[in-house]
Amino acid sequence: MEPRRAQAAQLTGSLLVAAAIVALVIVAVTAKLGPTSVAELEAREESREERIDAREERREQAQERREEGL
């Protein structure tokens, strides 16, 4: 019966250490990347690209008006 108890203790210890490692990895990754989700990051990027496109469109329209005025 003693070997089973020792195996159970070793298994329990290993599982606890594995859980601690996973928790540390989650904390490290969250600290590095931040709590922002992928969807939020994609939405920010899309919004940024839309602003850039709108700015470029306004520049092109202004350029066309200048060319038409000459």
Image (cartoon, rainbow, N blue to C red):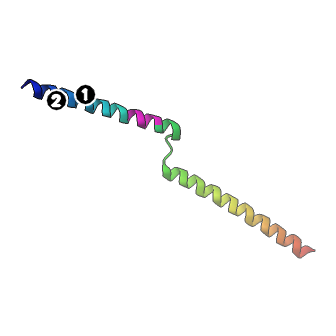
Label 2 sits on residue? 8
Q: Type of residue at label 1?
A: Gly
Q: Position of residue 36 (x, y in %)?
A: 51, 44
Q: Position of residue 7 (x, y in %)?
A: 16, 29
The rendered magenta stretch, by its main secondary structure, is classed as: helix
Task: Please report the residue visible at 76 percent of the width from the left and 65 percent of the height from the top.
Answer: 58
Task: Please report the residue visible at 83 percent of the width from the left and 68 percent of the height from the top.
Answer: 63
Q: For the residue labelled by badge 2, is the local secondary structure a helix, a strand or a loop?
A: helix
Q: From the image, which quarter does the C terminus lie in?
A: bottom right
Q: Type of residue at label 2?
A: Ala
Mark closest to the chain's N terminus, 2 or 1: 2
Label 1 sits on residue? 13
Q: Is residue 50 above or below residue 68?
A: above
Front-lying residue, 52 or 24: 24
Front-lying residue, 3 or 14: 3
Task: Farthest residue to the front: give it.
Answer: 3
- The magenta stretch is 23-28
Q: Position of residue 39 (x, y in %)?
A: 49, 53
Direction from residue 23 to residue 31 in the image, left or right: right
